Image (tube, coloured by chain):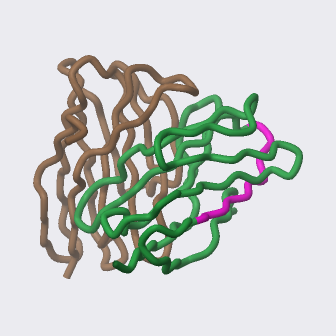
Amino acid sequence: QQQVKQSPQSLIVQKGGISIINCAYENTAFDYFPWYQQFPGKGPALLIAIRPDVSEKKEGRFTISFNKSAKQFSLHIMDSQPGDSATFFCAAKHGGSRLTFGEGTQLTVNP
Amino acid sequence: DSGVTQTPKHLITATGQRVTLRCSPRSGDLSVYWYQQSLDQGLQFLIQYYNGEERAKGNILERFSAQQFPDLHSELNLSSLELGDSALYFCASSIGGGVTYEQYFGPGTRLTVT
Protein backbone atom coordinates (compact mmCIF):
# COMPACT_ATOMS: atom_id res chain seq x y z
CA GLN A 1 0.00 0.00 0.00
CA GLN A 2 1.52 3.26 -1.18
CA GLN A 3 1.15 5.66 1.72
CA VAL A 4 2.82 8.69 0.17
CA LYS A 5 1.83 9.81 -3.30
CA GLN A 6 4.08 12.25 -5.17
CA SER A 7 3.50 14.32 -8.29
CA PRO A 8 4.49 15.15 -10.92
CA GLN A 9 6.65 12.23 -12.03
CA SER A 10 8.82 14.62 -14.05
CA LEU A 11 9.17 18.38 -14.20
CA ILE A 12 10.98 20.69 -16.59
CA VAL A 13 11.51 24.34 -15.67
CA GLN A 14 13.59 27.17 -16.99
CA LYS A 15 16.50 28.62 -15.06
CA GLY A 16 15.21 31.17 -12.58
CA GLY A 17 11.74 29.64 -12.46
CA ILE A 18 9.87 28.05 -9.57
CA SER A 19 9.74 24.27 -9.23
CA ILE A 20 6.83 22.82 -7.27
CA ILE A 21 6.53 19.18 -6.22
CA ASN A 22 3.52 17.87 -4.33
CA CYS A 23 2.97 14.99 -1.95
CA ALA A 24 -0.06 13.55 -0.21
CA TYR A 25 -0.10 11.06 2.60
CA GLU A 26 -2.70 8.75 4.09
CA ASN A 27 -1.38 7.78 7.49
CA THR A 28 -2.29 10.45 10.04
CA ALA A 29 0.30 8.99 12.42
CA PHE A 30 3.09 10.43 10.28
CA ASP A 31 4.72 13.31 12.13
CA TYR A 32 7.93 14.11 10.31
CA PHE A 33 8.21 14.95 6.63
CA PRO A 34 11.65 15.25 4.99
CA TRP A 35 12.58 15.90 1.39
CA TYR A 36 15.56 14.21 -0.22
CA GLN A 37 17.50 15.07 -3.38
CA GLN A 38 19.22 12.32 -5.30
CA PHE A 39 21.77 12.80 -8.07
CA PRO A 40 22.54 9.94 -10.48
CA GLY A 41 24.82 7.37 -8.88
CA LYS A 42 24.48 8.90 -5.43
CA GLY A 43 22.46 8.23 -2.32
CA PRO A 44 19.52 10.44 -1.32
CA ALA A 45 20.66 13.57 0.50
CA LEU A 46 18.48 15.29 3.09
CA LEU A 47 17.35 18.68 1.78
CA ILE A 48 14.82 20.06 4.24
CA ALA A 49 12.26 18.66 6.68
CA ILE A 50 9.13 19.79 8.50
CA ARG A 51 6.97 18.70 11.41
CA PRO A 52 3.16 19.05 11.19
CA ASP A 53 2.96 21.70 13.92
CA VAL A 54 4.17 24.33 11.43
CA SER A 55 2.67 25.24 8.07
CA GLU A 56 5.82 26.39 6.33
CA LYS A 57 9.57 26.06 6.59
CA LYS A 58 12.10 27.90 4.47
CA GLU A 59 15.79 27.23 4.01
CA GLY A 60 17.45 29.34 1.35
CA ARG A 61 15.72 28.73 -1.98
CA PHE A 62 13.80 25.72 -0.64
CA THR A 63 10.43 25.98 1.09
CA ILE A 64 8.13 23.27 2.41
CA SER A 65 4.43 24.11 2.66
CA PHE A 66 2.38 21.81 4.87
CA ASN A 67 -1.41 21.41 5.02
CA LYS A 68 -2.28 19.07 7.85
CA SER A 69 -6.04 19.04 7.27
CA ALA A 70 -5.57 18.12 3.60
CA LYS A 71 -2.73 15.70 4.41
CA GLN A 72 -0.60 17.34 1.76
CA PHE A 73 2.80 18.95 1.62
CA SER A 74 4.87 20.46 -1.13
CA LEU A 75 8.39 21.55 -1.97
CA HIS A 76 8.97 24.88 -3.68
CA ILE A 77 12.34 25.61 -5.24
CA MET A 78 12.74 29.29 -5.98
CA ASP A 79 15.13 30.61 -8.63
CA SER A 80 15.70 27.07 -9.92
CA GLN A 81 19.22 26.42 -11.24
CA PRO A 82 20.59 23.78 -13.65
CA GLY A 83 22.56 22.37 -10.71
CA ASP A 84 19.26 21.57 -8.99
CA SER A 85 18.48 18.98 -11.69
CA ALA A 86 18.04 15.69 -9.83
CA THR A 87 15.37 13.35 -8.53
CA PHE A 88 13.48 14.63 -5.51
CA PHE A 89 11.72 12.39 -3.02
CA CYS A 90 9.26 13.34 -0.35
CA ALA A 91 9.07 11.04 2.65
CA ALA A 92 7.24 10.60 5.92
CA LYS A 93 7.89 8.78 9.14
CA HIS A 94 6.51 8.13 12.58
CA GLY A 95 7.20 6.10 15.67
CA GLY A 96 9.45 3.34 14.41
CA SER A 97 11.28 5.97 12.31
CA ARG A 98 11.28 4.06 9.04
CA LEU A 99 10.99 6.41 6.07
CA THR A 100 8.12 5.91 3.65
CA PHE A 101 9.04 7.51 0.34
CA GLY A 102 7.02 8.97 -2.48
CA GLU A 103 7.63 7.77 -6.03
CA GLY A 104 10.08 10.55 -6.88
CA THR A 105 10.09 13.54 -9.24
CA GLN A 106 12.75 13.96 -11.88
CA LEU A 107 13.50 17.67 -12.11
CA THR A 108 15.26 19.17 -15.10
CA VAL A 109 16.20 22.83 -15.04
CA ASN A 110 17.08 24.14 -18.48
CA PRO A 111 19.74 26.87 -18.75
CA ASP B 1 29.69 13.26 1.63
CA SER B 2 27.23 11.99 4.26
CA GLY B 3 29.83 10.11 6.30
CA VAL B 4 28.09 6.79 5.70
CA THR B 5 30.21 4.31 3.77
CA GLN B 6 29.08 1.26 1.85
CA THR B 7 31.02 -1.50 0.18
CA PRO B 8 31.19 -2.75 -2.44
CA LYS B 9 30.01 -0.04 -4.83
CA HIS B 10 29.04 -2.56 -7.49
CA LEU B 11 28.31 -6.27 -7.29
CA ILE B 12 27.54 -8.62 -10.15
CA THR B 13 26.55 -12.16 -9.34
CA ALA B 14 24.50 -15.06 -10.64
CA THR B 15 21.08 -16.32 -9.65
CA GLY B 16 21.09 -18.61 -6.64
CA GLN B 17 24.19 -17.04 -5.14
CA ARG B 18 24.64 -15.25 -1.80
CA VAL B 19 26.18 -11.83 -1.26
CA THR B 20 26.99 -9.60 1.69
CA LEU B 21 26.69 -5.82 1.62
CA ARG B 22 28.50 -3.80 4.23
CA CYS B 23 27.71 -0.45 5.81
CA SER B 24 29.61 1.77 8.24
CA PRO B 25 27.44 4.45 9.83
CA ARG B 26 28.47 8.02 10.58
CA SER B 27 30.63 8.39 13.64
CA GLY B 28 28.39 8.47 16.70
CA ASP B 29 25.28 7.15 14.98
CA LEU B 30 23.69 4.18 16.70
CA SER B 31 20.92 3.40 14.25
CA VAL B 32 21.32 1.80 10.83
CA TYR B 33 18.63 1.38 8.19
CA TRP B 34 18.65 -0.58 4.95
CA TYR B 35 16.61 0.46 1.91
CA GLN B 36 16.17 -1.06 -1.54
CA GLN B 37 15.71 1.14 -4.59
CA SER B 38 14.35 -0.37 -7.80
CA LEU B 39 12.57 1.07 -10.81
CA ASP B 40 9.29 -0.72 -10.12
CA GLN B 41 9.20 -0.51 -6.31
CA GLY B 42 10.91 2.82 -5.68
CA LEU B 43 12.68 3.32 -2.37
CA GLN B 44 11.55 0.70 0.14
CA PHE B 45 12.53 0.28 3.77
CA LEU B 46 13.94 -3.15 4.57
CA ILE B 47 15.14 -3.23 8.16
CA GLN B 48 16.47 -1.10 11.02
CA TYR B 49 18.99 -1.84 13.74
CA TYR B 50 19.63 0.24 16.82
CA ASN B 51 22.78 -0.33 18.86
CA GLY B 52 23.03 -3.94 17.77
CA GLU B 53 19.39 -4.91 18.07
CA GLU B 54 16.72 -5.20 15.41
CA ARG B 55 14.30 -2.30 15.82
CA ALA B 56 11.92 -2.48 12.87
CA LYS B 57 11.25 -4.63 9.84
CA GLY B 58 9.76 -3.59 6.53
CA ASN B 59 9.32 -5.35 3.23
CA ILE B 60 12.32 -7.63 3.68
CA LEU B 61 12.24 -11.04 2.07
CA GLU B 62 12.95 -14.14 4.15
CA ARG B 63 15.96 -14.75 1.91
CA PHE B 64 17.45 -11.51 3.22
CA SER B 65 18.90 -10.97 6.67
CA ALA B 66 20.92 -8.31 8.41
CA GLN B 67 22.86 -7.68 11.56
CA GLN B 68 24.63 -4.88 13.37
CA PHE B 69 27.92 -5.62 15.04
CA PRO B 70 29.36 -4.23 18.33
CA ASP B 71 31.39 -1.67 16.36
CA LEU B 72 28.03 -0.56 14.88
CA HIS B 73 28.77 -1.48 11.29
CA SER B 74 26.04 -3.48 9.62
CA GLU B 75 25.82 -6.18 6.99
CA LEU B 76 22.93 -7.11 4.74
CA ASN B 77 22.99 -10.70 3.54
CA LEU B 78 21.08 -11.64 0.41
CA SER B 79 20.78 -15.32 -0.45
CA SER B 80 19.25 -17.49 -3.19
CA LEU B 81 19.41 -14.43 -5.38
CA GLU B 82 16.85 -13.91 -8.12
CA LEU B 83 16.88 -11.60 -11.13
CA GLY B 84 14.34 -9.40 -9.38
CA ASP B 85 16.77 -8.70 -6.55
CA SER B 86 18.79 -6.50 -8.88
CA ALA B 87 18.57 -3.04 -7.35
CA LEU B 88 20.41 -0.32 -5.48
CA TYR B 89 20.76 -1.05 -1.80
CA PHE B 90 21.24 1.92 0.49
CA CYS B 91 22.27 2.09 4.07
CA ALA B 92 21.33 5.09 6.17
CA SER B 93 22.25 6.03 9.70
CA SER B 94 20.98 8.34 12.42
CA ILE B 95 22.00 9.26 15.93
CA GLY B 96 19.04 7.52 17.51
CA GLY B 97 15.97 5.61 16.48
CA GLY B 98 13.37 8.25 17.17
CA VAL B 99 11.06 10.21 14.93
CA THR B 100 12.99 13.44 14.42
CA TYR B 101 16.47 12.07 13.96
CA GLU B 102 17.57 12.74 10.40
CA GLN B 103 18.70 9.79 8.35
CA TYR B 104 21.85 10.17 6.27
CA PHE B 105 22.29 7.88 3.31
CA GLY B 106 25.39 6.19 1.99
CA PRO B 107 26.32 6.05 -1.71
CA GLY B 108 24.70 2.65 -2.16
CA THR B 109 25.64 -0.73 -3.56
CA ARG B 110 24.39 -1.55 -7.04
CA LEU B 111 23.57 -5.26 -7.21
CA THR B 112 23.14 -6.92 -10.57
CA VAL B 113 21.94 -10.52 -10.64
CA THR B 114 22.46 -12.27 -13.97
Q: Look at the picture and state if A73 lies above or below B86.
A: above
Q: Position of residue A75 (x, y in %)?
A: 59, 55
Q: Look at the picture and state if A40 lies above or below B62.
A: below
Give the overall secondary structure of the magenta segment: strand
Please indicate whether residue A42 sits to the left or right of residue A12 in the image: left
Q: Look at the picture and state if B98 lies above or below B16.
A: above
Q: Identify the residue shown where x is 34% and y is 20%.
A: B30
Q: Identify the residue shown where x is 27% and y is 68%.
A: A40
Q: Identify the residue shown where x is 40% and y is 70%.
A: B38
Which quarter of the rendered picture does the N terminus of chain B lie within?
A: top left
B56 and A45: which one is in front?
Answer: A45
Please indicate whether residue A82 sits to the left or right of residue A77 in the image: left
Please indicate whether residue A73 sits to the left or right of residue B86 in the image: right
Examine the structure image and report whether residue A28 is included in the region drawn in magenta. yes
Examine the structure image and report whether residue B105 is included in the region drawn in magenta. no
B98 and B79: which one is in front?
Answer: B98
Please indicate whether residue B9 sits to the left or right of residue A78 in the image: left
Which quarter of the rendered picture does the C terminus of chain B lie within?
A: bottom left
A24 and B98: which one is in front?
Answer: A24
Q: Identify the residue shown where x is 30% and y is 54%.
A: A43
> Which quadrant holds residue B31?
top left
Q: Position of residue A26 (x, y in %)?
A: 78, 53
Q: Look at the picture and state if B70 lies above or below B2.
A: above
> Which quadrant holds residue B23?
top left
Q: Position of residue A57 (x, y in %)?
A: 62, 37
Q: Position of residue B27 (x, y in %)?
A: 21, 22
- Output the letter for the chain in green: A
State the hue of chain B.
Answer: brown
Per the rendered image, the range of residues in magenta is A20-29
